[in-house]
Image: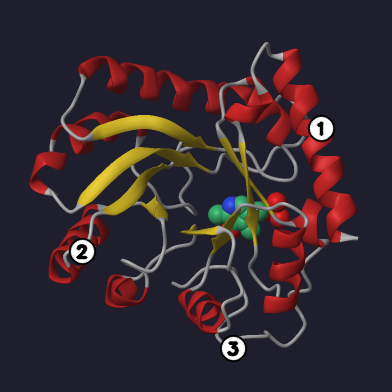
Amino acid sequence: MIAENVAKIRARMDAAARKAGRDPREIVLCAATKMNDAGRVREAIAAGIACCGENRVQELTAKLADRAYDGASVHFIGRLQTNKVKQVVGKVDLIQSVDRPALLDAIEKEAAKQGVLQDVLLEVNVGAEESKSGYAPEEVDAVCAAMERFPHCRVRGLMAIPPVSQKSGDNCRFFTEIRRIAVDITAKNYHNISMEILSMGMTDDFEDAIACGSTMIRVGTAIFGARDYHKQPTYGGNNHGTDG
Ligand SMILES: *Cc1c(COP(=O)(O)O)cnc(C)c1O
């Protein structure tokens, strides 16, 4: 079931990339593994998933202890409280959801303490939604310009979750805006900043995201099936896919 789903998504990714004149190999499929236990994560990795994105610190910690992600890289993609950075910094390959100055400060401090270089993405609240976190599009440039003050963090690109769309095509303008920000920042050649990863697109809109320049899609439902938010959580904690 998981293997079939992964194969179907890859076929759709390939078709979307080719239609946009892009090389399908430029686009990474990151499995959003929240609420899926270690066994299902292993099944996804056996089916060729090379990147897992986790939302909640508690699940991350439990699955790391289970060695559930062996064979794949691990990303943190959920809202991260500053008092939990210790459990994430140095334990994941990429923190995709750096959404505010206080979090960047906390990550820098922890990475310095551990003596590691932590790769991060800046999360952009591209739809200016009250309910979502992230930097405003117009703030991103200043954050990148100031990254010299964060020598233990390396910005590798941007992440965005646009508004829930009603129909296909609706979110193209948001994806295109993220790409435009990335192009502008790349042109400035800031020290230690790259914009190689544009993490955008989920189950409902990944083909549009690929058409508009995404280099990483984060897919949960289309790989694992619908999440049952009424079920007792496998790893405890709240059941809302975030940590805050
Ligand atoms: C759950 C989640 C996804 C995947 O969502 P689906 O619609 O199930 O594909 C992607 N990104 C983040 C940050 C998520 O929390």
Give the residue type at disc 2.
Answer: Ala
What residue occupies the far top of the structure in this picture?
21
Give the residue type at disc 3.
Answer: Gly
Task: Answer with mark 2 or mark 1, whichever residue precedes in sequence.
Answer: 1
Residue found 81% across the figure and 32% down from its top: 12
Give the labeled residue for mark 1.
12
Instruction: From the top left corner, tell me how far across and down residue 30 is, in percent.
Output: 61, 49
Give the labeled residue for mark 3.
236
SS under mark 3: loop
Instruction: From the top left corner, tell me how far across and down residue 153 is, in percent.
Output: 23, 50
- Contact, mark 3 vs mark 2 (Cβ under 8 Å): no
Residue found 63% across the figure and 29% down from its top: 25
Give the labeled residue for mark 2.
111
Quadrant where ligand 1 appears: bottom right
Residue found 20% across the figure and 64% down from its top: 111
- Quadrant position of residue 226: bottom right
- Contact, mark 2 vs mark 1 (Cβ under 8 Å): no
> Is residue 171 visible in the rendered structure shown here?
no
Q: Quadrant of the C terminus?
A: bottom left
Task: Answer with mark 3 or mark 2, whichever residue precedes in sequence.
Answer: 2
Give the residue type at disc 1.
Answer: Arg
Residue found 64% across the figure and 16% down from its top: 22
